[in-house]
Amino acid sequence: MSRSALVGNVVAMLEDAGFMVSDRCAIRPRSFDIAARRGEDLVLLKILRNVDAFDAETGQEMRRIGAYLDATPLVLGLRTRDEELKPEVVYFRHGVPALSPDTAMDLFVEGIPPLIYAAPGGLYVSIDSEILEDKREERGWSLGQLASELGVSRRTVSKYEDGMNASIEVAMQLEEMFGSGLTSPVDVLEGADEVRDEDPTPNEPDANPDDERMVTVMTRAGYDVHPTLRAPFKAVSEDAEDTQPVEGTVLTGHSKFTRAAEKRARIMGSLGEVVGTRSVYFVDSAKRDSVDGTALIEREEAESIDNPDEFRDLLKERTEYEEEPA
């Protein structure tokens, strides 16, 4: 299956599951391919045939953008270099959960979250420690007796009851032993933090010198500006005083107003509609006020505005969707 066909299948699956899906980010470089929202669940998806092509820089950027937009970054793919991705298993690439299309189908369409995750050494599950302890005590077993039945140390059983995850083999032994399920699902839509062993959100990059005028305008208007490296936008600008961070967020870009810039502005508008943000594109000159919900503001016009409220009113006015000229 080609990557383009895979992206099409994923979009169709998400729409069937009731998600609003953005336009595809068909520009390079791109840290993610689409954004999708259903209710409070917002995901940023990178779709690859081979998930090993997902590099560290892209993983760091997706995690940063996810933190800015209150979104979960996810990778969907078919295989690694060595094997196909197994169904019902969550993998990780540079701190980002990775799923097969079948696992994503179960999660998003059927509402069945995965129970298994892959980590160095094999496949693991999250044991519900309270249920395990209750089952052991109902049986009248000590920690040592359960350890003997499992063929592990007493200390290992104690760790299971303290919340340590177990190999899938041990989990199967426990469930067969007690005749009931003991595993907890992997919460993919929260980034699978309960099983993900990864550093905190990576530090953001420095702004490109070419972006300084844009950064100055947004900072003066009361925004904290977070530069990006591979996204369809140059920065995510957060309202420094807004108590609802995403609602006060603006996807921000700039360049000369070319066909490529217009395409980028359209993508930003689509992303903004799904994510719930505004978007603005600073240009040298333009004959239009907006492109599909992305405000177009000439640099000199923006730099002449001293009042933050005046800038925000202008941004709000121009981020209304307009009909295409005939």
Image (cartoon, rainbow, N blue to C red):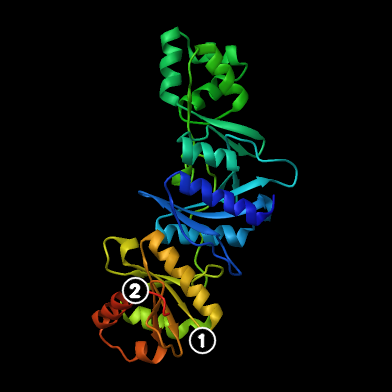
* Residue type of the residue flagged with mark 2: Thr
Residue 195 screen position, x and y as percent: 52, 39
* Residue type of the residue flagged with mark 1: Lys
Residue 124 got which mark? none
Mark 2, other Cα within 10 Å: few <14 / some 14–19 / many ≥20: many
Residue 324 screen position, x and y as percent: 41, 76
Mark 1, other Cα within 10 Å: few <14 / some 14–19 / many ≥20: some
Name the image quarter holding the C terminus.
Answer: bottom left
Q: Of all residues shown, which one is farthest toward the right? A: 82
Residue 178 screen position, x and y as percent: 50, 12
Q: Tags 2 and 1 in contact by the CB under 8 Å rule?
A: no
Give the residue displayed 68% in from the left and 55% down from the top: 53
Query: From the viewer's perspective, is residue 230 above or below residue 255?
Result: above
| Quarter of the image where one finds residue 230 | bottom right
* Residue 243 visible, this orientation: yes
Residue 280 screen position, x and y as percent: 40, 76
| Among numbered discs 2 and 1, the one appearing first in the sequence | 1
User: Which residue is the site of mark 1?
Assistant: 256
Q: Is residue 1 left or right of residue 101?
A: right
* Residue 94 visible, this orientation: no
49, 259: nearer the viewer:
259
User: What kind of element bears circle 1?
Assistant: loop
Q: Of all residues shown, which one is farthest toward the front? A: 326
Query: From the viewer's perspective, is residue 105 above or below residue 64?
Result: above
Give the residue displayed 32% in from the left and 72% down from the top: 320
Query: From the viewer's perspective, is residue 119 above or below residue 308?
Result: above
140, 250: nearer the viewer:
250
Q: CA distance from mark 2 to mark 1?
A: 19 Å
Residue 319 got which mark? 2
User: What kind of element bears circle 2?
Assistant: loop
